[in-house]
Image: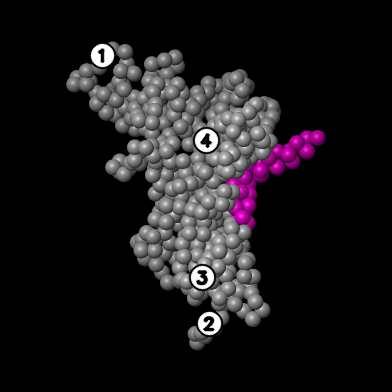
């Protein structure tokens, strides 16, 4: 019964899920969702569902890992057993170790770690549902969690993947486009300053395509950054609105 | 010199606050040189503060960073031979040495420290020494510093403590006077309410939670006064 996929772009020029070439999937995010964690974020990005908990800065155990001049960052990226097509073993696999590592490195340079010598900042990222582009989504969620925990940082990190599908550069790959497409290039940056914190590339791109991809990803990251900003401030503006209503009632 | 934010504007990390080399950086911000010009950015979520040519942030989220001289409410987590370890809700464990607790000489061979303070005891202590090299050192010698035996312990965000105290202690005085309770505040975000009336205790806790939730708004003291008056009326009706 399996029909072979012949093209990832429909005849009307849209992608399989009905998006335009440069269109993002619907994204929603909320901070402060976990009571026990110092900071947290729940993010849905298309069919991806990611929850991130941040603890710290706190005392580091085991002590031999401590660095006397700065804190360390530990990221644990995990796929839930039910997050992928076929049940995944709960033990971390190669992919999870890799993602934990690249997320750590991407976050490392954004935080002012020298303020907390001997300490640690722990991030636990669990992917509840995976549908392509989880590393960028995880990074987006992680930086919201860090900001929610009040850890001093140079800026909010935002991630978005671009890729090559049927010879065209598209933004925000879904799972099938990631697997069947010709290339995948996750990009993450601090939008305000344009500094890149993550750039990976799978597949073959010509120099022009890389340039185009970077340009497209910057536009997409700008849109996502505005959502992040709104999500972070939502907690406070809601209370303000509520107070305004009260004032009006009294008048 | 240009300041790009207004007073009390909500900002998030990485947002630019000001441009120009003569601007001084307050708390919660960092400087960066861009094209030979100094720019000041926020490093936390908070409210922008502008005073003359100093720009800073009053953070709305954050952990407790120990400061010398702070009064904290700690919990004993370990009893050692000549010192205790105290959880002060910060990134570092406080250490309380026996010499800073009792005045007489202490002989570790004959006595044991858990006769003075045990694991789980709550203390009001002061930080006497802290730097990047050493963990915070606490003392129990000073006015009002002691082991705390009764009251309700609540935990709030440490960054909200200045709001609970208020300008020159206005908010905390209001709470104490209107409810006739004893309130002990630790800079590390722990508060102890002492009263023998359960309903008043609940009321004070609700008032504190309200202050924390609305910490970033103005005119808070007046609202809390109204809140307390209303709730107290309801309490007296019930009786």
Badge 3 and badge 1 in a common chain: no
> Which residue is the extreme one toward the right?
A251
Structural distance between the alpha carbons of marks 1 and 4: 38 Å
The answer to whether the residue labelled 3 contacts the one labelled 1, judged by CB atoms less than 8 Å apart, is no
Q: What is the number of the mark on residue A206?
A: 3
Task: Tell me the SS state at disc 4.
Answer: loop
Does dot 1 land on a helix, a strand or a loop?
Answer: loop
| Residue under label 1 | B105
Instruction: Based on the picture, tell me whether residue A240 belongs to the magenta stretch.
Output: yes
Residue A233 picture quarter: top right
Marks 3, 4: nearer the viewer: 3
- Mark 1 — on which chain does it sit? B
Q: Residue furthest bottom?
A: A1
Res. A38 visible in picture: no
Residue labelled with disc 2: A5
The CA distance from mark 3 to mark 4 is 51 Å
Q: What type of secondary structure mainly makes up the magenta span?
A: helix
């Amino acid at each position: 019964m399996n029909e072979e996929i012949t093209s990832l772009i429909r005849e009307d020029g849209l992608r399989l899920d009905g998006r335009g070439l440069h269109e993002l999937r619907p994204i929603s995010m909320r901070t402060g969702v976990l009571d026990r964690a110092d900071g947290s974020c729940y993010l849905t990005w298309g069919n991806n569902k990611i929850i991130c908990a941040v603890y710290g800065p706190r005392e580091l155990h085991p002590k031999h890992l401590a660095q006397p001049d700065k804190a360390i960052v530990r990221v644990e990226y995990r796929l839930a057993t039910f997050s992928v097509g076929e049940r995944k073993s709960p033990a971390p696999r190669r992919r999870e170790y890799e993602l934990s590592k690249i997320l750590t490195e991407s976050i490392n340079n954004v935080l002012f770690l020298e303020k907390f010598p001997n300490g640690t900042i722990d991030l636990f990222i669990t992917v509840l549902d995976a549908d392509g582009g989880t590393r960028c989504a995880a990074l987006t969620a992680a930086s919201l969690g860090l900001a929610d925990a009040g850890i001093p940082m140079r800026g909010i990190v935002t991630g978005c993947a671009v890729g090559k599908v049927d010879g065209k550069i598209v933004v925000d790959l879904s799972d099938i486009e990631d697997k069947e497409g010709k290339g995948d290039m996750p990009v993450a940056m601090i939008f305000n300053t344009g500094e890149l914190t993550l750039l990976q590339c799978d597949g073959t791109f010509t120099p022009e395509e890389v340039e185009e991809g970077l340009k497209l990803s910057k536009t997409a990251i700008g849109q996502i950054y505005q959502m992040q900003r709104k999500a972070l401030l939502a907690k406070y503006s809601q209370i303000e609105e509520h107070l305004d209503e009260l004032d009006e009632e009294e008048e | 010199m240009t300041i790009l934010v207004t007073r009390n504007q909500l900002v998030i990390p990485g947002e630019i606050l000001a441009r120009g080399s003569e601007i001084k950086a307050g708390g919660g911000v960092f400087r960066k040189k861009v094209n030979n010009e100094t720019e000041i950015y926020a490093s936390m979520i908070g409210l922008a503060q502008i005073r003359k040519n100093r720009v800073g942030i009053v953070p709305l989220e954050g952990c407790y960073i120990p400061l010398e001289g702070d009064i904290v409410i700690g919990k004993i987590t370990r009893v050692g031979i000549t010192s205790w370890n105290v959880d002060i809700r910060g990134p570092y464990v406080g250490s309380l040495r026996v010499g800073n607790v009792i005045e007489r000489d202490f002989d570790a061979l004959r006595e044991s420290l858990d006769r003075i303070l045990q694991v789980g005891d709550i203390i009001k202590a002061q930080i006497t020494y802290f730097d990047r090299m050493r963990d915070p050192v606490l003392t129990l010698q000073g006015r009002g510093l002691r082991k705390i035996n009764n009251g309700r312990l609540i935990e709030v965000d440490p960054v909200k403590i200045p709001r609970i105290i208020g300008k020159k202690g206005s908010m905390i005085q209001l709470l104490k006077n209107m409810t006739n309770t004893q309130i002990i505040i630790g800079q590390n975000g722990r508060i102890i309410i002492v009263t023998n009336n359960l309903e008043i205790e609940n009321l004070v806790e609700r008032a504190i939670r309200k202050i924390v939730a609305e910490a970033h708004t103005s005119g808070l003291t007046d609202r809390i006064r109204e809140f307390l008056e209303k709730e107290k009326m309801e309490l007296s009706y019930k009786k």
